Image: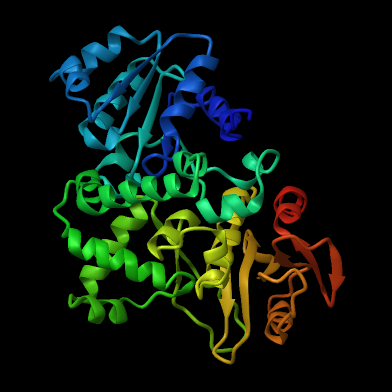
Amino acid sequence: MKDIIRDDIKLLLYKLGQSPAVAILGARQVGKTTLARQAGDAVAKKYIYMDMESSSDLALIGDSPEDYLQYHQDKLIIIDEVQAYPILYSRLRGLIDKNRVNGRFLLLGSVSPGLVKGVSESLAGRISYLDLYPFKLNEIIDQYNIQKHWFRGGFPRAFLAATDYDCTEWMQGFTRSYIERDLSSLFGVNLNSEINRRLWMMLAHHHSQLFNAEELSRSLGVTAPVVHKYVDYMIGAFLIYKLQPWYINSGKRLSKAPKIYLRDSGILHYMHRIQDIDALMSHPIVGASWEGYVIDQIIYHKPAGIDVYYYRTYSGTEVDAVLVKGNIPIASVEVKLSNAPTIPKGFYIGINDLQTTHNYVITPHADLYPAKNAWVCNLAHFICKVLPNL
């Protein structure tokens, strides 16, 4: 088995050549440190690595990080878990302004910068961002099958585990750590671990459904603002995301609520206590799981300049994913688990509403063939052949 090469390494090296600082953002255990070290090995100059959650590294830079960092100005400085020491952002600004050389700092963060006070403003115009996702389909497709990727998800240690049991054991530790400690420590807030646990489980059961904070708050016995706060932190930690609806001036009554998804199918399956692919195929969540997995991969692989939405009217018309370039819908996607799918009438009505010219029904393994105003194809074909050319 060959090592899995992250295709983001090329983009990362390009960004390091264009900007004084680059930040790799993504969930914990997604592979940020590995990617950063690979970039460090690839650049011409030496690099040093520091972890802001390490007491020894914090002691090393002391109260005057400028002095230590300035001493190593000829190296690429990799700073891990940078959100744990947010004052560093403002200190880096001064160092960059004194010596504006591209590729000086590589910052690794496990939270969205917008949720760390003052971070976005500190390095504005001096930093470039790279979102790192779990293993993507095009990174594993040559060595592994889609079924394994779908079931285990893309977190490296889960996906590469020797057995499904080992994968489940890793997922247990990963989710427990986030529930009991990480989500609070990442943002410097005191979150209730029991609310974390119950809410994450509820979101797993509402995966691919419309997000309704009032409904969740009643089930949890808390207020809707509390639900919104916890959900915002989960989004900021790259654990879940909201898929926003696409609006058009059609005069039709459209759904305006976002849909909620767990970001990784492996975590979703662990939350439902699904032990293997056979159990998944007979589980009630299987259709929603496949839909979320497909939309994940579309988001992970989409070209720059394309945004992803969903479309739904109150009369029942629905398009699972709408790909929009600029302000123009260019592609409609229906997600089906069957390789010989029955295409709903509502999808064709949606195509007509959106006036999209590229329309696809995505299945796990179907060969490419035409349907009415659309093409049926498998996910690998869509990701590797269709999406790059939209």
Q: Residue furthest right?
A: 370
Q: 225 or 1, which lies in front?
A: 1
Model colouring:
rainbow
In percent of the image, x 63 and y 59: which residue is there? 326
Q: Is residue 292 above or below residue 385?
A: below
In percent of the image, x 38 and y 54: which residue is there? 239
Q: At which x and y percent is residue 290?
A: 58, 65
Residue 264 appears in the picture as rendered: no
Q: Is residue 300 above or below residue 351?
A: above
Q: Quadrant of the C terminus?
A: bottom right
Q: Is residue 268 above or below residue 254?
A: above
Q: Is residue 84 above or below residue 283?
A: above
Q: At which x and y percent is residue 221?
A: 18, 78
In percent of the image, x 24 and y 44: which residue is there? 186
Give the image quarter of residue 49.
top left
Q: 328 or 71, which lies in front?
A: 71
Q: Residue furthest bottom?
A: 315
